[in-house]
Image (tube, rainbow, N blue to C red):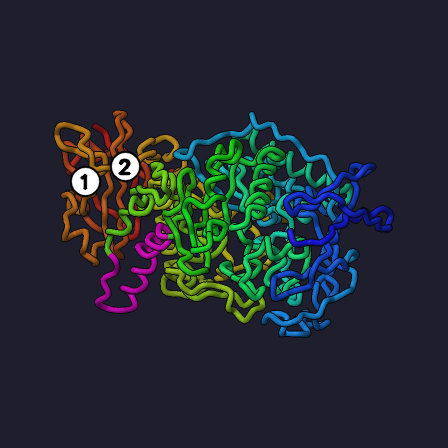
Amino acid sequence: MHAEAVEVCLFTDGEERRLPLTGRTHGVWHGHLDGVTHGQRYGLRAHGPWEPARGHRYNPAKLLLDPYARAIDGHISWGPAVFAHEVDGETWLPLDGRAFEGGAAIPNDEDSAADVPHGVVVAPPQADLSLQPKVSWPETVIYEAHVRGLTMRHPKVPADERGTYAALGHPAVVEHLTRLGVTTLELLPIHAIGDEPALVRRGLRNYWGYSTLSFFAPEPRYATAAARKAGPDAVIVELAQAIRTLHEAGIEVVLDVVYNHTAEGGVEGPMFSLRGLDAATYYRLDSRGRDLDVTGTGGTLDFRNAWTVRLALDSLRYWVTAFGVDGFWFDLATTPARGTAGFEPDHPFLVALRTDPVLSRVKLIAEPWDVGHHGWRTGQFPAPFSEWNDRFRDDVRTFWLADAAETRRHEGVLGHGVRHLATRLAGSADFFSWSASLDAAPRTPTASVNFVTAHDGFTLADLTAYERTQTEATGDGGAAGADDNRAWNHGVEGETNDAHVLSARRRSMRALLGTLLLATGVPMITAGDELGRTQHGNNNAYCLDDETSWLDWGDDRPDQPEQLERWRQDLLATTAALLRWRRELTALRQDRFFAGRAVHTDGTTDLGWFAADGTLMDHDRWHDASLRTLQMFLYDPTPRGSVLIVLHAGDEPVPLTLPPTPWARSFHLLWDSAFEHPDDVPHVTTPAGGGVVVAERSVRLYRALR
């Protein structure tokens, strides 16, 4: 909107031809170029004022990536040329610090065309949307994974395909996902990535990919070497085929997307695209041209501007129609929902997503926070959004791990009881049963995406083995990871050969998995947790593209078959068994909140809470901080559909009385986390009101027979 002229630069055999755009409508430059064909490499150059205090840093020496480019070619060659202002040749910091305090910056006139990726004209694919599995929210089980991390060490995937889009569709990977029972593969960002200067200086890269260079082009580094050599078209085809293969297997694909900031970072950062085209429009800046940063990375996009909103919507729509993706997880979703005064549940961007004829039909998941003022907004996104439920994560970890650690270390500490845990198990109605939106559209328990671990934080195994973060490998002095892990090392920090400690850790892992996969809401598993994956205590491996972050699938030596350690096989079998029970028992897949409704004339309700003695929970027990045992009865109208979930986090076995009649006639044991393998569980039946002994730190699942 503020550019005085824009040129399209066509690159052929190393030669650059510049063609000015001649039309300008409502501040947007446009034109038609004859003779541009498939495969053409191109970029843009923008002319305009150099006024950093107003947010303008127009510099025609910098080749700019078309924000709508469907493919890219080349990579960033880091050096002074990619910055619009003069920088130190070694640190890449501004030579004139006043430039970023509202002063007069020093422009850099070094041409960047040879140092930045170019856009490529390609024919995008056209997805067959009839193949989309369209899994309902109550049936959804999300599996969060990284393209490279998921398959880099998979012994059944050919070496030249490991860590690529092609590997996502390999039969061995598809078989694992279907055997496990997940319905939806959520991929960390696959939009083209721009590594941050600080990482490049340390010889690292942004492995997670939350640093977007292009909102339309897929990241080339995730394609096979053969596809990269063949060109951008082959990269696109490889990704499209992988998604199609997953769809044919009944598995959805959801993408992590980052519309809160870009790879250009803060105002001291490089110039790749939006900053050179119109920083004052696309970025959130103050009256002196400085960052208004609510993401912690700089380069916060400004969704108060219609052109920013349009760019994001066009990008999202493209990924659905071209590749057939089934939904999106929005990183730091509070940021694109910020207006002038802060977060707005009826922000134009959110309204557009909910009403768009394409995007309103796919899964929309918010990470409901950012680092800005009043950034934490869990439960405040409107339907049909679902949200990551960080309170579920914290309360479940506290019940099974943090309270156990504290009570062992400090005599007299009581813990937090079972009140918060119960709320999470029942779907977190305190956050999701209401709507902050003006239209007051009703929400359901599936608005809560329940998780115990995610890509950001300890793995499941590390939650039980470490209490202190181990992030030295990131090269930033160990300052990368959060300290509020609510973990418990079971008496020994890190690796150990102590059989008792290892057994206790496995017991806690099974209890955590059981709580996650039996709770009301939508469960999310982090890739590798079902295999006992460790990052050796690193809870923020965002820049480690190595064995730290890659899944260990077992022995990958060519002279030996794949073989997981026995305890890892057992954990995999446990996860699959829990998901099988979740599929078979509709009581575990509630699509509305419990209301304490009487479902029989005898007074039994749709949800019943019982103490260890088999009597209903009362006010005093709910507020008893020492309580470590809880029974949850879930009613289902089918004769064999109601279930009972027993959770006991105490250090010793506990005698327990099952709920009496008329809640059920008897209870049939389906699963007990005290057993390493689900096949070892004795499927005994106990009459209602009967007594059993529940092992320490364990979860049980019963079928309630009426």
Q: Which residue is mark 2?
A: 702
Residue 250, compared with residue 158, is above or below; it is above
**Upstream in sequence: badge 2 or badge 1:** 1
**172 or 315, nearer to the observer:** 315
* 32 horizontally vs 531: left or right: right
Position of residue 56 measured from the top left corner of the image (x, y, whole percent): 65, 60
Q: Residues within 10 Å of mark 1 (few under 14, many from 20)?
A: many
The stretch in magenta equals: 391-416
Q: SS of the residue at dot 1? A: loop
Name the residue rendered at 51%, 50% in the picture.
304
Q: Which residue is mark 1?
A: 658
Position of residue 449 measured from the top left corner of the image (x, y, whole percent): 40, 44
Name the residue rendered at 34%, 42% in the picture.
435
Residue 83, compared with residue 691, is above or below; it is below
- Report if residue 227 is visible in the image: no
Residue placed farthest to the left in the image? 602
Position of residue 90 measured from the top left corner of the image (x, y, whole percent): 71, 72
Identify the amino acid type marked 1. Leu
Identify the amino acid type marked 2. Tyr
**292 or 531, nearer to the observer:** 292
